[in-house]
Image: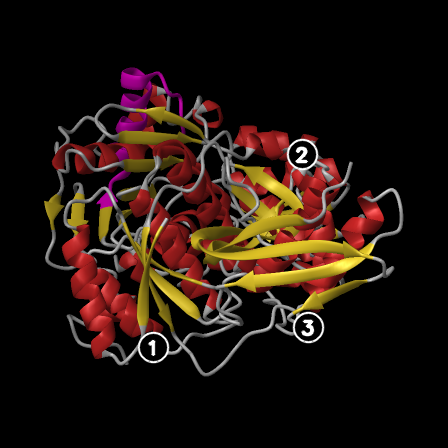
Amino acid sequence: MFDRVRLRNLEEFEDPRMVPLGGHLFGACFFLMKLLPARFMLERAVERGQLGPGGIICESSSGTFALALAMLSVQNDYRLLIVGDWALDRNLRRRLFQLGVELDIVETAHPTGGFQLARLERLQDHLRNKPGSYWPAQYSNHDNPTAYSKIAARFIDVVGPVDCLVGSVGSGGSMCGTARYLRLLFPELKVVGIDTHNSVLFGQPNALRHVSGLGGGIIPANVDHTQFDEIHWLSAAEIISAAHDLHKKHGLFMGPTSGAAFRVARWWSDNHPGKRVVAIFPDEGHRYADTVFDVAWVAANIPNWTRTRSEEPITVPSPGVKMTDWARYPWGRRGLSEVLGDGLPPG
Amino acid sequence: MAKKRGTGKAIAHHGELLQGVFEDAGGQLLRGLVSLPCPALTSIATFAPNERDEVTVSPTFCEKARRAASQSLVTFARVRTGGHLRLVTNIPIGRGMGSSTADVLASIHAVLDYLGIVTTTESIMRIAVDAETACDSTLFKQQAVLFAQRDGIVLEAFRKPIPSLNIVSVDMAPASTVSTLEFQPAQYEPGEVEIFRPLRSLLRRAIDTGDVLSLGRVATASAWINERFLPKPRLRELQAIAMRYGASGLQVAHSGTIAGLLFDPVDARTPENMDLAIRAIDALGLSQRTFLT
């Protein structure tokens, strides 16, 4: 009934490998999770006539979304321009360069909106200068969360009814999309989101962050706060040590956001025996071999690396409090203004 | 040697457990459904040949059944054959219970019985879809199927039949009827079809493991998705009754007026729960009946 555009040569890389981690906890291990929403967004853009053959794609990203778009662009003969910043490390830069990506690195942060906003402003210049170019806009594009129906289906295929979904929040696509589809069938599903200290996504004051891939300085429209039952905040040191633990205990060499998901999901699962928990592990660890997995680099770059870490979160009275350790807040599926307004209704 | 007459029988369905848009093996999207069979209601067709070279039917309004019988003769009879087709049914009309499809299928079976021919489910389906525009999946009895009702093809065969269910059946709009032919099929947005992926996954698992609760969750989700296209009055009230009395789920005819509360026959509390639900439905002023499948 619909003639669908299919850019599926890399589809085999999209589905996560589901690994049991003891109890009723499963890790959904992605090769590169962003391949799924990137592919889905491009297909829909072609169907809507926003992206023509050989067209130019422009996006702001300093991480895996850029890589996913670059791989898909090579496969499908698109040209790609990426606006990035310092977080785009040397290895990834080299890869993007080899994939023929035009890279524009923003050197100075926006006075209030940080690098994220500076990147978005620079991107607008490029879009103006390249008429007809397509901006996937992963932070606001509804096709981003929509793509995750496939992941919700995969979780059901392997796990059956899911009781709890745990994962870090960046664009909001994976967590809010997967949660929305699972809740259609399991309304009592618990959704546990993970952010990092000094990220504004769930109400921390904006300040310097030491880890990328989750949190941020602006709130993406795709973050639907009303999906979350609980929010946890981890420091960079806690996230990185958790990634090491996931490797040491289960042999899974995954990136820092996977570590974050593992830390919180393990705790949640141990405290809710019998509940089926799925944790999202968005990418593999190879990209971080010289950083997150290099102890010398970590000791030199990550604050409080040698400090003893807590085994469980401290429940905080409000998301805005000063945090130094693992913090938890019962979000209760409320909107952001509802939570930050100290219980007053929004508006 | 052909018989003097042939008879055929087909069952009704109680709407669908799931209806939507699904990917075929090649990744293209087709409309599909999983009917909920209702063997208590049947259509029985009798075909008797005569000297005329066309097929007549009684009751006379069963034109699609007549066309199906006629097409079956063209396809399978070695000589041009006419005759009279007679249909007896207890399936309510215009409720979304497949009365018309059952007439068509019973008529095809009656002709095949008369000719002494055994053929494939697929070729029966093809004639039925030609006569009826769309068809249901009640013909598949050994295992449940996800069926492309407008293309007459099986999108997916599940490992088992649909598990036994107790259905409290409610007609939500007794005064109106829905015609399969006139009913405009749901126009889904391209992004909206994604919703059916997790439903298909849970349905597959529910059928393969005989999990009535999961089956009910799929049916409930599908029922609410359909509200955008063919809303049922008072569905929210029925849902509240389903939840209060431990029904596994709510289920509807996606192109009809009936809805059902699904109960697990294995659950020891089901008889009492059904009793309470029936009283609550009566109190709403809606009429109900019970089917055991």
Q: Are marks 2 and 1 on the same chain?
A: no
| Side of B14 where B244 appears, left or right | left
Q: Is residue A59 above or below residue A8?
A: below
Give the number of the mark in front: 1 or 3. 3
Q: Identify residue for label 3.
A: B60
Q: Nearer the viewer, residue B289 or A288?
A: B289
The furthest residue to the bottom: B175
Answer with the quarter of the image where residue B261 lies. Answer: bottom left
Q: Are marks 3 and 2 on the same chain?
A: no
Q: Identify residue for label 2.
A: A97
Q: Is residue A93 above or below residue A203?
A: above
The chain carrying label 3 is: B
A242 magenta-colored: yes
Answer with the quarter of the image where residue A304 lies. Answer: top left
Q: Position of residue A15 (x, y in %)?
A: 51, 33
Q: Secondary structure at mark 3?
A: loop
Q: Nearer the viewer, residue A270 or B264?
A: B264
The chain carrying label 2 is: A
Q: Tag 1: residue type? A: Arg
Q: Secondary structure at mark 1?
A: loop
Q: Nearer the viewer, residue A249 or B32?
A: B32
Q: Are marks 1 and 3 on the same chain?
A: yes
Range covered by the magenta-colored residues: A233-255
Residue in the image at 27% along x and 37% along y: A277
**Gap in angstroms between the C-alphas marked 3 and 2:** 74 Å
Q: Which mark is residue B234?
A: 1
